Amino acid sequence: MLAKKYVFILLFTLLSSALTAQELRAKVTVLAGRVNSTVEKKIFVTLQSQLNDLMNNRKWTSDGFSQNEKIECSFILNIESIIETNVYKASLTVQAARPVYGTSYQSALVNFVDADVNFKYIEFQPVEFNESRVQGTDASVANLTAVFAYYAYLVLGLDYDSFSPKGGDEYFRKAQNIVNNAPESKDISGWKMFDGTRNRYWLNENLINTRYNIIHDIIYNYYRTGLDKMYDKEKEGRAGILQSLTQLYTFHKENPNTMIVQFIMQGKALELIGLLKKGTSEERAKGIELLSVLDVLNSSRYKQELQ
């Protein structure tokens, strides 16, 4: 009887552990090809390890995630130059995907390059994030973890939005907390409205602005009533995708130059061509009409592939 009790406790512990696993399956890569010093490059190997620990070992939500529910994502920190001793200028490429029902296909949620990631790093310094002390004691040190935490919450918010209407609100608010309390110094940018029109401030502003609530419906419709139905209800799935694109088109016409439209469309061309190519001539024509406006850079490609 005692042995059975311990077996039960062990199984319960394993199950609890599986359901409370961290949310992200993140791969962080630090590229330092532009840094000439061998010593500096060794430092970035350490930094890469610490950032992987931060993203994969920190619990970002209170929800339970099983191993197969973890969100696939990657972060490429490209060191571009040394501003001063231990202070670096870098860009960050963020990519994340979510599975499509009934398939092994992963559809992109995020495909974005942040060009304004300046930070201070001394080898083996703690790489940690504290929501209540976003600024930390040294702004240049805190900026790196603030940026990574911001994108962790952004990825989570978009993933939750893709499975339930406005499901990501909590995580967009957490990202906004980071924006509101972001580190400040002369070398740090991307957190303020006047830092440009395509930055962290404006991206999250577009996601929490109640005037733009339709964006969350668009995200949900594209993935849940569109992509997820393509496996066994292809006609309905394609209709759902076209509906979400129509909604995005209307939003874009009413709110020109908002960052979120470009953000949503980034890296979607190949996927959308594949989804619409098998549609009727009317569906393909509608796709060309919408996508030529929503994704101008790829307009000729849509016309060529979907004619």
Image: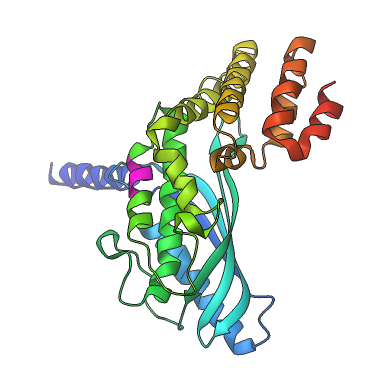
Q: Is residue 41 above or below residue 206?
A: below
Location of residue 176 in the rendering, given as x and y in whole percent from the top left corner:
36, 50
Q: Please, which colouring scheme is shown? A: rainbow
Q: Residue at x 35, y 37 (%)?
A: 169
Residue at image position (47%, 69%) is 188
Q: Main secondary structure of the magenta part?
A: helix
Given the current orientation, which residue lies at the most extreme left position? 2
Q: How many marks?
A: 0
Viewer can see residue 203: yes
Q: Residue at x 33, y 45 (%)?
A: 173
Residue 117: give x, y in percent of width and height.
53, 66
Left or right: where does residue 269 sit relative to residue 236? right
Asked if residue 163 lies in the magenta stretch, the reply is no
Part of the protein shown in magenta? 170-174
| Residue at position x 53%, y 82% in the image | 43
For residue 171: magenta?
yes
Q: Quadrant of residue 191?
A: bottom left
Residue 102 in sight in this render: no
Q: Position of residue 53 (x, y in %)?
A: 42, 65
In this view, the residue in front, 74 or 70, is: 74
> Residue 10 at what x, y percent from top left?
24, 48
Q: Is residue 15 left or right of residue 222?
A: left
The quarter holding residue 135 reads bottom left
Above or below, 236 against 293 in this view is above
Above or below 208: residue 219: above
Q: Would you place residue 226 above or below residue 268 in this image? A: above
Q: Quadrant of residue 1?
A: top left
Indicate the quadrant containing the C terminus: top left, top right, bottom left or bottom right.
Answer: top right
